[in-house]
Image: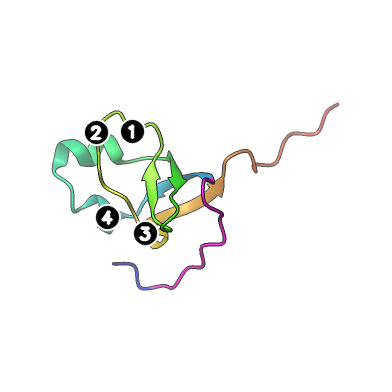
Amino acid sequence: MPTATLTDSFSTGTIVAARLARETLARFDPVLRSLLAGQQFFVKLADGRWHPQGCQLGLCQCFEFGELQGAVARGSAPRPADD
């Protein structure tokens, strides 16, 4: 479990790009761990939990905001200036 308290200011339905925390990944078997590692998209559910968007693994697992690292709202990355 994460020790730091993080504030989740995202609205229901928001999609973020994030990585799962190392402690969270460790709960899965090695095959799933390798598939879930790395940055992916998560969607915020009405109950405040986060679910991997478009998960093809049939994963019924949802995550707390504190289990996501480096969450950035989709489409909020700075765009390069036009020359």
Identity of the residue drawn at 50% across and 51% down: 71
Q: Amino acid at mark 3?
A: Glu
Q: CA distance from mark 3 to mark 1?
A: 17 Å
Does 2 appear above or below 50?
Answer: below
Q: Amino acid at mark 1?
A: Cys
Q: Amino acid at mark 4?
A: Thr
Bin the neighbour count of mark 4 within 10 Å (Cα to Cα): few under 14, some 14-19, many 20 and up: some
Does 7 appear above or below 52?
Answer: below
Q: CA distance from mark 4 to mark 1?
A: 17 Å
Discs 4, 1 touching: Cβ within 8 Å? no
User: Along the line of sight, which residue is nearer the eye, 52 or 67?
Assistant: 52
Name the residue tied to disc 3. 64
Name the residue tied to disc 2. 58
**Secondary-structure class at tag 4:** helix
Name the residue tied to disc 1. 55
Q: Quadrant of the N terminus?
A: bottom left
User: Along the line of sight, which residue is nearer the eye, 38 or 43?
Assistant: 43
Q: CA distance from mark 2 to mark 1?
A: 6 Å
Q: Residue 80: give x, y in percent of width and height.
A: 74, 34
Q: Residue 20: give x, y in percent of width and height.
A: 35, 50
Q: CA distance from mark 4 to mark 3?
A: 10 Å
Q: Is 70 one of the magenta-colored residues?
A: no
Q: Residue 67: give x, y in percent of width and height.
A: 36, 58
Mark positioned earlier in the residue sequence (4 or 1):
4
Left or right of residue 63, residue 26 in this image: left
Left or right of residue 48, residue 36 in this image: left
Q: CA distance from mark 2 to mark 4?
A: 18 Å
- In the image, the segment drawn in magenta is 4-14
